[in-house]
Amino acid sequence: MGSTKGLTGPIMDFECVAQREAPPIGQLNPPHRLLCGPGPGNADPRVHAAMALPEIGHLDPAFISMMEDVKALLRYAWQTNNSFTIPVSGTGSAAMEACMANLVEPGDKVLIGCNGYFGKRLVDMADRYGAEIITMEAAWGTVFSFEQIKAAVEEHKPAILALVHAETSTGACQPLVGVGDLCHDNGTLLIADCVTSISGVPCHLDKWGVDAAYAGTQKCLSCPPGISPLSFSERAMAKLMNRTDKVKNWYLDMKMVASYLVGGKGATRSYHHTAPISMVYAIREALTIVAKEGLESRWARHRKNAEASGPASKTWASSVSWILSTGYRHLQPLRCRRGLIRVRFASMCSTNIKWKLETASATLKGRSGVLA
Amino acid sequence: MGSTKGLTGPIMDFECVAQREAPPIGQLNPPHRLLCGPGPGNADPRVHAAMALPEIGHLDPAFISMMEDVKALLRYAWQTNNSFTIPVSGTGSAAMEACMANLVEPGDKVLIGCNGYFGKRLVDMADRYGAEIITMEAAWGTVFSFEQIKAAVEEHKPAILALVHAETSTGACQPLVGVGDLCHDNGTLLIADCVTSISGVPCHLDKWGVDAAYAGTQKCLSCPPGISPLSFSERAMAKLMNRTDKVKNWYLDMKMVASYLVGGKGATRSYHHTAPISMVYAIREALTIVAKEGLESRWARHRKNAEASGPASKTWASSVSWILSTGYRHLQPLRCRRGLIRVRFASMCSTNIKWKLETASATLKGRSGVLA
């Protein structure tokens, strides 16, 4: 039996009296919504069921094994062999910041494609990590041509080029064929924002030479937000591992996260932070559903639903019009009186929940093209 | 009807072929564990049920209203009137880093109490945000006396004093009575790590003068990890709002998070990141359960279970001994052959799940006092 007499201070009895009363909060009762706006989509009921399974510890061998499953499934979703392909313990913006915090070294030239809301966010993040930022601009709703990208990369030879694969705010899908090779020829790493594209449109990280990609779970993966896919190529990992300074972000320090989720020599794992256990169950289940459906079928389903959504939207309100081009494969931007909105048609499209325009219009804030 | 011919590039048909096959991953099947180690504890089944409710958008008025409930309930759990009392969109370490990223300005003197694993983590984080760090050391398992704290604060007059209220790695509970007044007399902000203490032992942020507190959900709140309580006093908010530089962390920039979760003039909310919807449901439900049980009953229950756990542990193995003093109110550190471990007795203690030593010993890594 141990004894620590005198080692610690007592808690006074008067402290054991609560002076503030509990607020009168009623039962949790979220309304049913068909979510087609730029925020989260509806999660698959199987994912919700997985989240209700009992917690295990974040270092339990069964948990480590589950994490390995998630990594393998993510590699499939992204068509990559990248060893460092993991779920980040936060929502999509955390994985986005993980790219910037780990790959941008102070003074690095970072070229960022700004053709929507999320390009601007990349600029803000890169700025916080000391990047020398160069922006490449295009009108919202459009994408960059290969020639435009080539000219900018060859002119600036940046350490990093960051492009948004699918712009959540406009629905535009940036072609990435050949961009990786172009980057590597110029000593540049390619980062791609795949928040809205993962499993909704083709994402070939290896074939396209993408060095770092991040995504959200709450879009085409039909999983609640709270965890976010991230993948680094060997080139990206080499840049990170060769850094001599500390990454200026503890929670998202991927050197440390790698020692937990990938393991060191002999695959020993060291504790970094507590992973969000239930969200790991959720993403594993969501990715299992992706694997079962098959990527090709899933891409085709998203395209079909996107194509159907324009005409369907006319049944809501005569003020709504739509945009359809080959660049919009899974997101359907709609125009209406109060500006530009995006309506996404994912797995929920085939359910029998009644469509309501108010669901979509709740995402409007009056300014054209601004994500509400 | 809109048209964007020529605005976007096409996705080539050859890209719609997946080249990597789906891995053969089986059904999710986590084992049942009674979690008493330093990681997450078992979540309340009511919390799991809440997480299975359908998602709504992160800007839906119903979600904003739910967030207000969470804030009110957190104020009760922490016995504070702090307006800025919110759930951070990550696990406990994210809320810890939110304190450091937002309140430490480059060059600030930061005094940190190091008497366990998490004091060291605070040092690492403060270092990344440019603090001039002063450490105050005490043996692992012990706490700092008021005189020791007073001497250090008066000598250094730091911008910030950070103390761990309940050290998860040792079970020691740091008395905080009078520490806030001492800090404010010396122009110092007081930060308290309440990861393991919230709702398990008395936490009186206002009475103690704590300016910034962070916590985990997966300990005494019986909620899965993935979201984490944070509270800033008016003093702390003033330091943040008076900063002229950008916070060097986008995801955890509480100026921006405040514009989303607290609102600006006229209570307008602006989008920052997508909150982890299901985890917000979870923490709301967990805090509702805390309010229903009542803090005083909850503190008493944790204490009773902690006191019972020492003798109970002898039924597991003769090599186990225990420590019991007035300083350990809700955490029960156990010693065994392979080092020091902590066994926590929370709400699950009253269930009929069979105890297993292996559950606890899975958290051992051989080094005395090291959190595995």
Image (cartoon, coloured by chain):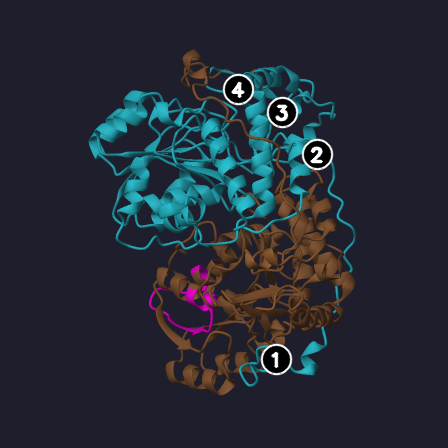
Chain colours: A cyan, B brown
Q: Amino acid at mark 1?
A: Ser
The residue sitting at 41% across, 39% down in the picture is A120
The residue that label 1 is drawn on is B325
Q: Are marks 1 and 3 in contact (CB under 8 Å)?
A: no
Between residue A172 and residue A237, name the one nearer to us: A237
Tell me the subunit letter for badge 3.
A
Image check: A116 left or right of B349? Answer: left
| Residue A32 position (above or below residue B39) | above
> What stretch of residues is rendered in magenta?
B101-120
Residue A136 drawn at (x, y percent): 32, 32
Q: CA distance from mark 2 to mark 1?
A: 52 Å
Q: Amino acid at mark 2?
A: Arg
Q: Secondary structure at mark 4?
A: helix
Q: Amino acid at mark 3?
A: Ser
The residue that label 4 is drawn on is A299
The residue that label 2 is drawn on is A33
The residue sitting at 56% across, 37% down in the picture is A283
The C terminus of chain A - image quarter: top right
Residue B354 drawn at (x, y percent): 71, 55
